[in-house]
Structure formats: structure tokens, C-alpha cells
Amino acid sequence: MMKNLFKSSLLLVSLMALFTACENSADPAPQSQLLSGGSSRTWKVVSIRKDGSDRFQSSCEADNLYTFYAGSTFELDEGGKKCRPTDPQKQLGTWSLINSAITIKQGNRSFMQMEIRSLNSSRMVVTNELGGETVETTFQAQ
């Protein structure tokens, strides 16, 4: 009887240790899944900083929506205000992620390149070079 109780206790402790180890070693979601939400995720710019200070974002760009789809498809929607009436409402492309570098392409040309500084399911902070200066852009998931 005592032997069975010891075996049962040992089994229970082993299972609890295994469960705890699995729970604590869970990897965070990969950046590609956070970016695309697993199927699609739409982002909107909420802040642009250059040289450590906030920069004005034109109203025609402030309502733009950036959607990253699983399978590496990208869509830029101009929102309600276009900067130029002749601009297409939507621009399609592809995206790739290598390490923390996002490259967005339209056809064979790079449309945008950004380095991820932080990313979770609701907020993304990226940097890119513009005219020799570093620009930090913060996106909010929609």
C-alpha cells in the first residue's frame, strides 16, 4: 500500500514538474505571426519621431491602413483622404521578414524597408532611414 502511494505521489510530482516546465518554456509568438495576426492584421500609424521629436504626419497619410496577410501579401489602403486624387485607393505588394527587417515590395522594387524595434499583438515600433536620418514610426493594430 505504501509502495503504491509512493509511486502515485512520484507520478503526480513528475507530471506537475513536466507541466510547469512546458508552461514556462513556451516561446513567444514569432514576429511574422504577430505582424500578420496569423491570417491578417491591419496597422495604423499613431506616431512618427525623427531626431527624437514628434514629426507632423499629413492628414492624407494619417488615415492610411497597412495590412499584412499571412502568406506574405501586403495591402496599403489610402483611407478616406488621399494625398493626390489620382493615387490608387489600394496598393498591393508582398512582404518579407528576415530577422527583424521587414521589406515590402511592389513587383520587383522595394517599396518600404523597416527594422522592428518592438512588436506585440497591438503595437509595433519600427525604424527606417530617410534622407540619412533615422525615423521611428509607431503603429497600432486596428
Image (cartoon, rainbow, N blue to C red):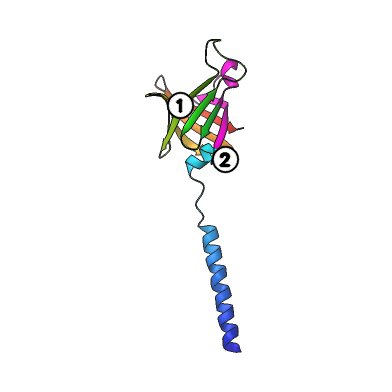
Image location (x, y in percent) of residue 5:
60, 84
Given residues 101 and 54, the one toward you in this image is 101
**Residue annotated with mark 1:** 93
Given residues 119 and 85, the one toward you in this image is 85
The amino acid marked with disc number 1 is Gly
Quick check: is 52 in the magenta stretch? yes
**Residue annotated with mark 2:** 121
Give the SS element for disc 2. Answer: loop
Residue 20 is tagged as none
Residue 53 visible to an observer of this rendering: no
Give the SS element for disc 1. Answer: strand
* Identity of the residue furthest to the bottom in this view: 1
Image location (x, y in percent) of residue 102:
43, 33
Residue density around tag 2, few if under 14, some if 14–19, many if 20 or more, within 10 Å: some
Q: Is residue 129 above or below residue 59?
A: below
Image location (x, y in percent) of residue 1:
61, 89
Q: Quadrant of residue 40?
A: top right
Q: Residue at x 55, y 70 (%)?
A: 15
